[in-house]
Amino acid sequence: MILITKNVIDQLQILDQIKDDSSGAVVFFTGSVRNYNFKGKVEGIFYEAYEEMVEEIFKKIENEIFENWNIKKFIAIHRIGYLKVGEISVIVGVSSEHRKEAFEACSYGIDNIKKRCPIWKKEKMGSGNFEWVEGVMISE
């Protein structure tokens, strides 16, 4: 399952979907809004995305993961819109027979989402002002 959503991400529901009776490992990454950055207090983040392109890139990342690791299931969900401190912005889950490939595939998934997907964020600072956050730079 790959998805861009404006809805709250339910970790337990996703964990239920990623589990597989033939898997001995489930690795789950959640990214959430933290209450600070190097400039000071953060009250929330507004995420914007080029949704069609993100979904296309999510599919490519999913295909790459299935080609390179022996996994059973892959889930990647990114939330857009305004999120408060503590809310989940992204979740990546992988199930596989063994932990090593689950960890590697999950790490590859989140790293590539951060590097390749056109998702932008503005942080709402303690002052009430919004500031764009510089993204991850890639070289290919």
Image (cartoon, helix red, strand yellow):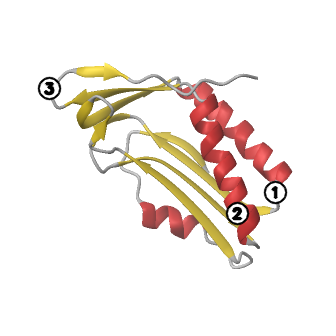
Please report whichever mark, 3 or 1, sits nearer to the chain's N-terminal start: 1
Does dot 2 land on a helix, a strand or a loop? Answer: helix
* Residue designated by label 1: 69
Whole-angstrom CA distance, mark 2 to mark 3, is: 41 Å
Q: Is residue 65 above or below residue 133?
A: below
Residues marked 2 and 3 touching at CB (< 8 Å):
no
Instruction: Name the residue furthest right.
Output: 67
Q: Is residue 48 left or right of residue 21?
A: left
Please report whichever mark, 2 or 1, sits nearer to the chain's N-terminal start: 1
Kindly tell me whether residue 83 is visible in this rendering: no
**Residue 79 appears at what percent x and percent y?**
43, 40
- Using the image as rendered, state which of residue 6 and residue 30 is in the foreground: 30
What quarter of the picture does the C terminus occupy?
Answer: top right
Residue 122 marker = none
**Residue 65 appears at what percent x and percent y?**
76, 49
Please report whichever mark, 2 or 3, sits nearer to the chain's N-terminal start: 2
Does dot 3 land on a helix, a strand or a loop? Answer: loop
Q: Residue at x 52, y 23 (%)?
A: 50
Q: Is residue 43 left or right of residue 37?
A: left
Whole-angstrom CA distance, mark 3 to mark 1, is: 45 Å
Residue 127 marker = 3
* Residue designated by label 2: 102
Near mark 2 (Cα within 10 A), the count class, few <14, some 14-19 or many ≥20, is: many
Does dot 1 land on a helix, a strand or a loop? Answer: loop
**Residue 99 appears at what percent x and percent y?**
71, 70
Q: Is residue 41 above or below residue 69?
A: above
Q: Residue at x 78, y 44 (%)?
A: 63
Residues marked 2 and 1 touching at CB (< 8 Å):
yes
